[in-house]
Amino acid sequence: MNEQDLKRAFQDVVVTSSPPPAMDPNRALDVARKARSKRRSSLVGAVVAVLVVGVGLGSAFALNPKGTGEYLVGAGQSSSSKPGEPLTEWGDRWPAGQTDRTARQGPQAARGVQLLESIKASAQSHGYETPALKFQSQGYSNGDMQWTQAQIASDKGEQPELWEYTAYVPVRKNGKVGKLTIEVSTPNPEDASEPCALARQFWGMSKATCKVRDVDGLKVGDASSQEQGRVMDWMSFKHPNGWVVNVAQSASYDGGGYPPLDGNPFLASELGKMAVDPKFVLIGG
């Protein structure tokens, strides 16, 4: 990626709605690179998908004409019939009602709120408070430490339509504060299926250490990294329907100004169970 490409991708990075504290430049670069990569591969993925579906439907029609016809009719129905591929109404460049990649109202924004409330409930079930704290450190403009966003990750006319939902939650116990982060994305043909390859796609953490963990018979990428000054541990899981869940934790919340927890908030087994929890597949939101 040259300087001009990065600048163009950077301009597409979403500005959150509530608004969040000053953006971490490392995070912004990760999002910019990821958005550009998705745009680059979307056309190839769409062509391959058309060829594969065309061959498959030809064979299926010969075996079961009625069933194949029903499949074709179903493909044209509302987003509920094709989870992860919302049929969004678009304006000139962005989805209707949006001025950038962020959905600030409507069903996609509601999914972001749903994700925030769901991850807070998971933290609370393990004995943590999830207070609505403000950043104390200079440079964060006293912004909210607890926030969520929904953003379109694909461009107008690209298929499949890609949405990402992210929530950040301060988790507190005995006056000490850590951080729980979750990112959920709709099915993307670019997402790896192998658990550790999937985990290394999270925020561009390509050098992360990772092992495959068994969680209730499901294979999860158990990763950690200190790249670009971050100290994070996370779990990545690709659900059977293609939705991807990344759940990350830190013993401290950068910029919060609060004393950190003595260690990671959750055991690896607890974080893994969050990654495979079907409530984070935001169908119907």
Image (tube, rainbow, N blue to C red):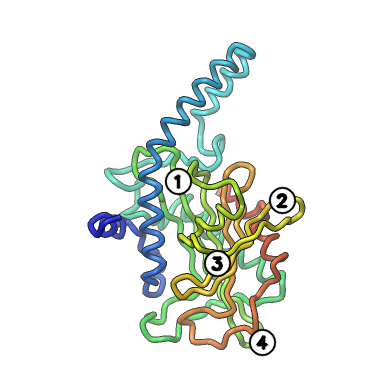
Mark 1, Cα crowd under 10 Å, few <14 / some 14-19 / many 20+, is many
Q: Residue at x 67, y 76 (%)?
A: 128
Residue at numbered disc 2: 218
Question: What residue is shown with label 1?
Answer: 162
Q: What residue is shown with label 3?
A: 181
SS for tag 4?
A: loop
Q: Are marks 2 and 3 in contact (CB under 8 Å)?
A: no
Q: Amino acid at mark 4?
A: Asn
Mark 4 burial class by Cα count in 10 Å: few <14, some 14-19, many 20+: few
Position of residue 258 in the picture relative to residue 15 (left or right): right
Amino acid carrying mark 3 in the image: Thr
Q: CA distance from mark 1 to mark 4?
A: 40 Å
How far apart are the two marked residues, 3 and 4, measured between alpha carbons?
20 Å
Residue located beneath label 4 in the image: 174
Whether residue 118 is visible, yes or no, is no
Q: What residue do we see at 58% from left, 82% from top?
A: 177
Q: Residue furthest right?
A: 216
Question: What is the C-alpha distance between the residues marked 4 and 2?
Answer: 34 Å
Please name the residue shown 49% across and 62% down the image: 205
Disc 2 residue type?
A: Leu
Q: Position of residue 117 (x, y in %)?
A: 59, 63
Q: Amino acid at mark 1?
A: Leu
Mark 4 in CB contact with mark 2 (< 8 angstroms) = no
- Nearest to viewer (mark 4 / mark 2): 2
Cβ atoms at labels 1 and 4 below 8 Å apart:
no
**CA separation, marks 1 and 3?**
20 Å
Which x, y percent locates residue 143?
A: 42, 77
Q: Is residue 147 placed above or below 251 in the rendered structure?
A: above
The percent position of residue 223, horizontal first and vertical second, equals 60, 63
* Circle 3 Cα neighbour tier, 10 Å, few/some/many (<14 / 14–19 / ≥20): many
Q: Is disc 3 placed on a helix, strand or loop?
A: strand
Do callouts 1 and 3 mark residues in contact (Cβ within 8 Å)?
Answer: no
